[in-house]
Image (spheres, grey):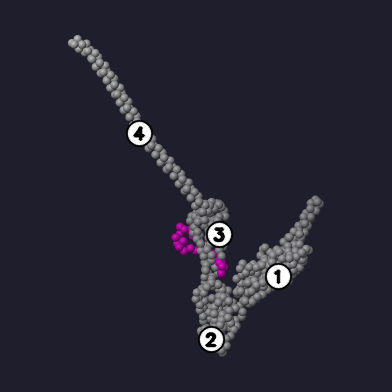
Amino acid sequence: MKQLIFIKILIILLFFGGVFSSSAQSASLYLSPYSGTFFIGSTFDVSVFVNTEENNINAVEVNLKFPSELLQVTSPTAGASFVSIWADQPSYSNKDGVISFKGGVPTPGIKTSAGLVSTITFRAKTPGIATVFFLDTSKVLLADGKGTNILKSTANGEYNLVLQPPEGPKISSPTHPSLTTWYRNNNPVFFLEREGDVTDFSYNLDQDPSGIPDNVSEGNNNSASFNDIGNGIWYFHAKAKKSGVWGGVSHYPIRIDTDPPKPFKIRIDTISPFSYSRFFSYFSTEDSLSGIDRYEVSVVDMSDPQALSNPFFVETASPYRIPFEKTGKYAVLVRAYDKAGNFAQDRTVLTAISSFISYTKEGIRIKNFLLPSWLIYLIIIVISVLLGFLIYNYLKRRNLAKRLKTEVAEAEKEIEDVKKLEKRIQEMRTLEEEARKESERLAEKLKKEENNTQPTDEKQN
């Protein structure tokens, strides 16, 4: 009993010792500053720090993700980093919105609560909330000779990007009232607040967040409209003239997206091989401008014409369980909406033959096994070729047999004719022999008659 108690105590001590050891071997990465408000067109620095939490580390790998539509990296300079050996030089991509650092220090490593890995300089591009976060591939390696990753937590950064305070007339837009919302309308209208002593306005529309209109008056009309503006983020810049002097500039951004998301295809799959109510539709796409906002799905029994002509959509996500409890033919429609309200749609037809057999335009599915359409077509082609080959050989053999039969019949006829000819020849030979014998008989008879008449003649003489 004492031994059993001792073993239990030992196990408990080992367990809690392992927990304490595991919790002690941890580190964290964080950004500084972790928040802030910055004007469009300005630059600001964000530093990456590591807290080793009393552990000695000798290597760190930092992979950051940032919204490339809102921020632009101007410099990923390491600066006064504690990293003395860079495995890879700091790199970044403003297209993909990623930044990477990978380096370390010699043995015995470093222990720090605020070790600077690098400082990044961002430029604010457009208004919005920009979140910079650590990817799961980030690592902090313990100086234990094994390269143990002890990174346990990360702290992201969130930055509010805003336009410069208006220095000119106040701008509003009835067609694009929100500064951060995407719109399908590419015919924007703007209104300018007119003070009593304003005589002229100057304005323009471009894609430069810091653009400045020229000093040429557009008149004193306090509204402006534009038609067929291209996709993207545009800025309306305006200034007013008071007492013969042009004032400061105000900026108003609008976001236009008239293109639907990229085309996509619905894939039908099944979770359970024993129930036709377990079919799932899978779908996914992208939108290069405003981004995907939501997906809507409609599943319609094709035997119901009214439902088919007016399908009911529900907002959902992929995968979506197809809600039906019987075999039959169903139209599955999926719409992908972007944040401007444009949508792309795909449609497929699911035919549930039995509890485990169905087919769509992808192919025939038997339980969880899909026989793709291209393979079915290939099998049909192969079978057709084989069938054609067999039919060709059959017809060839039949024609050959027919021709042989005809030739045999002709040969038999020729043989019959030969037999008749031989019979005729034999008859001719028989007649010839009879004629010869008759001739010989007649000759002998004549000879006898001559012999019988010869003495009488002699006596007469």
Are circles 2 and 1 on residues that touch, CB within 8 Å? no
- Return the residue at label 4: 413
Are circles 1 and 3 on residues that touch, CB within 8 Å? no
Considering depth in this image, is 226 or 420 the residue closer to the camera? Answer: 420
Residue beneath the point at 35% across and 33% down: 414
Q: Nearer the viewer, mark 4 or mark 3?
A: 4
Are circles 1 and 4 on residues that touch, CB within 8 Å? no
- Return the residue at label 2: 200
Amino acid type, mark 4: Lys
Please report the bounds of the magenta region as a residue range.
287-316
- The numbered mark, 2 or 1, whose residue comes first in the sequence reads 1
Q: Residue furthest front?
A: 461
Are circles 4 and 3 on residues that touch, CB within 8 Å? no
Q: Identify the mark at residue 78; answer none if there is no mark.
A: 1
Residue beneath the point at 25% across and 16% down: 447
Considering depth in this image, is 331 or 285 the residue closer to the camera? Answer: 285
Spatial CA distance of label 2 from label 4 is: 118 Å
Quarter that holds the C terminus:
top left
Amino acid type, mark 2: Asp
